[in-house]
Image: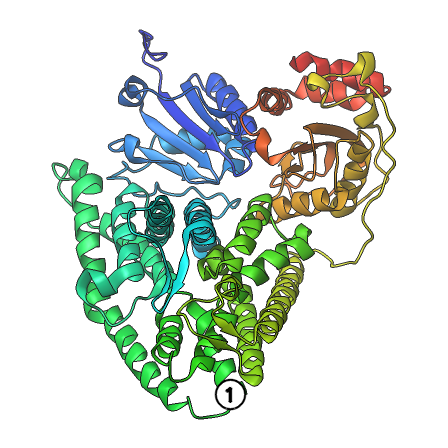
């Protein structure tokens, strides 16, 4: 197939990739603007879009080989290895919308991209630009999102195997070797062994791209199982995996900055960077990070053994605190092994640990049920799995929550664990097997079962309530920092009349005359989003209008959806809506939306889609809408339409 650049006349040949976190509007508007600007500048342009409908107009090897430069207009990670040796300019997606002509001129003088390193940044101000706290948080969440399936699958396989095939012994819950449930448990164990390497690896990947993946995963293995890998005294657990992920990512970035001969550049991302960063991280962990972890384990073991004769309430609180702190790290392991070592001579210490062990997953799961609006759909699903894991004493069910929000979740876990341990210690609860959680009571291993459950319930409630309170505080602080006033408002409640879409539906039924408002009453952005959400609720497609507003406002905090030229497209991807729904409204006076060109938004679309809707055909239509809004004549007709039917008639042009 001939390349689109196989023209005889040698015009500048520029490629571009556009992408934004939601993949709904900015991605396609930037693509349209760049394409129009290229035509004006007599430049050949091909734009790859990475949106919710998938990657379109994919850049081929021939396209890249013939290109004079590449523009990356994106606010999300874009793989850059394929552009090695090409002039590369990386800017926020908003720059692709607001200054496409300048980008096309700049890229022709941009530095050549070397070995997968992030491209040079333009002078745009929209987006994180891969630096600072925002990039670190994005990397952390990248690790969490990839880890969650391993936690859920591994944890549920272990839980089911314990319930149906496990039996209590002096060594804990065991299985008949070679039985079906023995193998189910083993498969679940593999999932857990991969959990921290995946977590660490994808933190590193988000920071340093593919060359950082291998050192990140190997660092995660060290954090998860250094005891067996090289005979360490203790493992570092999930906190260690966070450290190795960030170290691997930043090491890879640092090595990329080293100037090497051109002959070496092609092997930098696939050989040099992975090997050097893996060796550096591995040796750093073994000889530097591992020492204080081993020291802490030894010291804590001695100290805790010395506490066994003290107040049962104090000892229980300490055991609970340590169990809940790092879930697999040296503090957790110290408390557990001290408790196990005393089985047979002082079963109450194991009783304290057994009560604290399930509190973290049960508390986090309960938190997602009590305040669903504080959590994403993925977090709510993980919360259900965490509840099940907690019942079987699998504390790792709480790790995704602690990894995503350590400052809120870890203190809440520790407080709940301390309460559970203290109550169990006060009541003299005993456990004769080295395992925890409600499941052990079914095996007859618990003495004082009623108070055992009271201790777990108290700790779980404290964890859940504290977690939600701390998350609430964090959200309020974030809003104040963003300049958004915090106000307590009742949920938007609008009747949902039974109705059909009739003859006036367009956008495949997602926008109708009933979701068009000729003039907004609101004069501020947040109020306008609430007014639009209330209008969308009249369709019957909105399960929770307040949650829809929350998600839309959270998207605004990531970066304004004011696209300039009098346009704003607030959008939300949330299961607060049951079906894709689009609304349109005008504001004659205009609403300050934070657009880079300082124009007020007068044409406002609100797009709401369910989480599971990514990739469906409606998003292709929304992409066409975003492109069409770049046409000044189209915007003018939309602004001058006399009534709702006239607005819908204008919008039919995009089909």
Residue 67 occupies which quadrant of the picture? top left
Farthest bottom residue? 310
The correct choice, above or below, for 221 with respect to 548 in the image is below
Screen quadrant of the N terminus: top left
Q: Is residue 618 left or right of residue 272?
A: right
- Most foreground residue, 55 or 282: 282
Q: Is residue 107 visible?
A: yes
Residue 544 occupies which quadrant of the picture? top right
Residue labelled with disc 1: 312
The correct choice, above or below, for 399 with respect to 56 in the image is below
- In what element is the residue under mark 1? helix
* Dot 1 alpha-carbon crowd within 10 angstroms: few under 14, some 14 to 19, many 20 or more: many
- Most foreground residue, 62 or 402: 402
Q: Is residue 321 visible?
A: no
Residue 418 is situated, as x and y percent measured from the top left of the image, at: 54, 77
Which residue is depicted at the point 23% across and 59% down?
281
- Most foreground residue, 571 or 587: 571
Q: Is residue 42 left or right of residue 572?
A: left
The correct choice, above or below, for 222 with respect to 92 in the image is below
Residue 161 is situated, as x and y percent measured from the top left of the image, at: 42, 50
Residue 585 occupies which quadrant of the picture? top right
Residue 19 is situated, as x and y percent measured from the top left of the image, at: 48, 33
Which residue is depicted at the point 42% across and 65% down?
327
Q: How is the image coloured?
A: rainbow
Q: Is residue 158 left or right of residue 25?
A: left
Q: Is residue 166 left or right of residue 516?
A: left
């Amino acid at each position: 197939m001939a390349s689109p650049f196989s023209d005889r006349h040698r015009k500048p040949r520029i490629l571009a990739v556009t992408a934004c976190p939601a993949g709904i509007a900015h991605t396609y508007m930037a693509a349209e603007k760049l394409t129009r600007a290229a035509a004006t500048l007599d430049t050949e342009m091909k734009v790859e879009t990475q949106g919710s409908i998938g990657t379109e107009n994919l850049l081929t090897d021939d396209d890249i080989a013939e290109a004079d430069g590449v523009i990356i207009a994106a606010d999300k990670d874009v793989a850059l290895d394929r552009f090695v040796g090409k002039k590369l300019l990386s800017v926020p997606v908003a720059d692709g919308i607001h200054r496409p002509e300048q980008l096309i001129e700049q890229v022709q003088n941009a530095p050549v991209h070397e070995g997968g390193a992030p491209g040079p940044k333009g002078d745009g101000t929209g987006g994180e630009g891969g630096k600072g706290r925002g990039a670190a948080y994005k990397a952390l969440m990248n690790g969490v999102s990839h880890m969650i399936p391993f936690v859920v699958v591994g944890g549920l396989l272990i839980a089911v195997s314990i319930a149906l095939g496990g039996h209590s012994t002096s060594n804990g819950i065991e299985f008949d070797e070679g039985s079906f449930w023995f193998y189910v448990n083993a498969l679940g164990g593999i999932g857990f062994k991969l959990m921290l390497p995946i977590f660490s690896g994808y933190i590193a990947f988000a920071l340093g791209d593919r060359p950082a993946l291998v050192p990140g995963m190997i660092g995660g293995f060290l954090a998860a199982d250094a005891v067996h890998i090289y005979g360490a005294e203790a493992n570092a657990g999930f906190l260690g995996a966070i450290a190795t992920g960030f170290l691997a990512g930043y090491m890879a970035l640092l090595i990329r900055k080293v100037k090497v001969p051109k002959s070496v550049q092609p092997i930098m991302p696939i050989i040099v960077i992975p090997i050097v960063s893996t060796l550096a991280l591995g040796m750093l962990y073994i000889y530097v990070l591992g020492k204080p972890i081993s020291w802490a384990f030894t010291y804590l073991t001695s100290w805790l053994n010395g506490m066994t004769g003290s107040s049962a309430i104090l000892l229980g609180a300490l055991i609970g605190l340590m169990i809940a702190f790092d879930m697999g790290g040296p503090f957790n392991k110290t408390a557990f092994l001290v408790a196990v070592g005393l089985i047979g001579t002082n079963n109450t210490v194991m009783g304290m640990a057994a009560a604290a062990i399930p509190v973290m997953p049960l508390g986090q799961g309960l938190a997602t049920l009590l305040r669903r609006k504080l959590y994403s759909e993925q977090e709510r699903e993980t919360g259900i799995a965490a509840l099940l894991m907690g019942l079987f004493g699998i504390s790792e069910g709480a790790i995704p929550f602690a990894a995503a929000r350590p400052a809120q979740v870890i203190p809440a876990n520790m407080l709940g664990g301390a309460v559970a341990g203290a109550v169990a210690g006060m009541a003299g609860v005993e456990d004769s097997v080295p395992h925890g959680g409600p499941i052990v009571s079914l095996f007859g291993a618990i003495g004082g079962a009623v108070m055992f459950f009271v201790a777990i319930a108290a700790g779980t409630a404290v964890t859940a309530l504290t977690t939600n309170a701390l998350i609430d505080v964090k959200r309020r602080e974030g809003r104040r920092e963003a300049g958004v006033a915090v106000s307590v408002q009742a949920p938007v409640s609008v009747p949902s009349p039974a109705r059909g879409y009739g003859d006036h539906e367009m956008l495949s039924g997602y926008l109708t005359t009933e979701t068009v408002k000729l003039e907004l009453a609101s004069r501020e952005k947040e109020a306008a989003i609430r007014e639009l959400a209330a209008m969308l609720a009249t369709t019957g497609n909105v399960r929770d209008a307040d949650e829809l507003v929350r998600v839309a406002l959270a998207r605004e905090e990531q970066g304004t959806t004011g696209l300039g030229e009098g346009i704003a497209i607030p959008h939300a991807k949330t299961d607060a809506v049951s079906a894709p729904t689009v609304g349109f409204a005008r504001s004659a006076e205009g609403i300050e939306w934070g657009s880079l060109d300082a124009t007020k938004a007068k044409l406002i679309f609100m797009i709401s889609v369910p989480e599971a809707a990514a990739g469906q055909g409606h998003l292709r239509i929304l992409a066409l809408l975003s492109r069409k809004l770049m046409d000044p004549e189209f915007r003018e007709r939309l602004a001058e339409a006399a009534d709702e039917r006239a607005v819908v008639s204008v919008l039919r042009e995009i089909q």
